[in-house]
Image (cartoon, grey):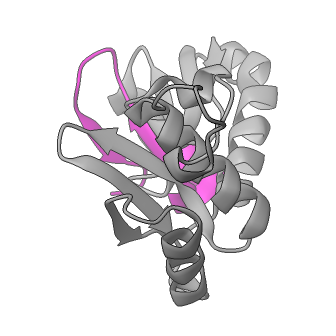
Amino acid sequence: MALAACGTAGSPEGAATKPSLPASASPPGAGTPTAGDRSAAVAEFARRQFPEVFSGLTVDRDGTTVHRVARGAAALEQALAREFPGERLRFADSPRTAVELDDLARRVAADVPGLQEEGVSVTEVGPDPALGTVRVTVEDPDAARDRLAARYGPGVTVTGPGPDAVPAGG
């Protein structure tokens, strides 16, 4: 079973890459940071400075989306614009912060042995900032969805081995 940290989806940031400085703050001769480096730096800054607002990042071919809860969003957006001038960021609302998602993911991960005993075969647990939920991948999502919704509420999305995700209780 794998447990991922909340940061960027679609990039290796959750896989313990080091955040780096924005291009404007790189030491002379250091080279240009990659898009992944810049996204990791945005995530690190937002997580550290705005833990009560920041939910995570998603990176796709269209760019970087900063997921955040609505309360305090303007302050986060202004700070990111100051710290990362010229960085093209999109913003999207999320129902939960990264701290809340990480806490719920750890709770689910800690419950995996008990879930296995109950017949729920969990293969992966991790925050999904785009949905603002914790994604729980199981062998049989139809059998597990109601059980996990009852146990964890609307903060989990149950997925199976395939690409489709259906929110628990939904």
Farthest residue to the front: give it: 28
Quadrant position of residue 29: top right
> Magenta residues?
148-170
Q: Residue at x 72, y 22 (%)?
A: 112
Name the spot of residue 92 as percent of width and height, x first.
36, 69
Vertical order, 122 against 108 (above or below) = above
**Residue 166 on the magenta segment:** yes
Q: Residue at x 49, y 42 (%)?
A: 38
Indicate left or right for 32 with 29 as reference: left
Name the spot of residue 72 as percent of width and height, x first.
61, 87
Name the spot of residue 39 as percent of width and height, x first.
48, 43
**Residue 20 on the magenta segment:** no
Q: Is residue 44 visible?
A: yes
Quick one: 12 or 104, which is closer to the camera?
12
Vertical order, 50 against 100 (above or below) = below
Q: Residue at x 71, y 46 (%)?
A: 102
Quick one: 100 or 162, which is closer to the camera?
100
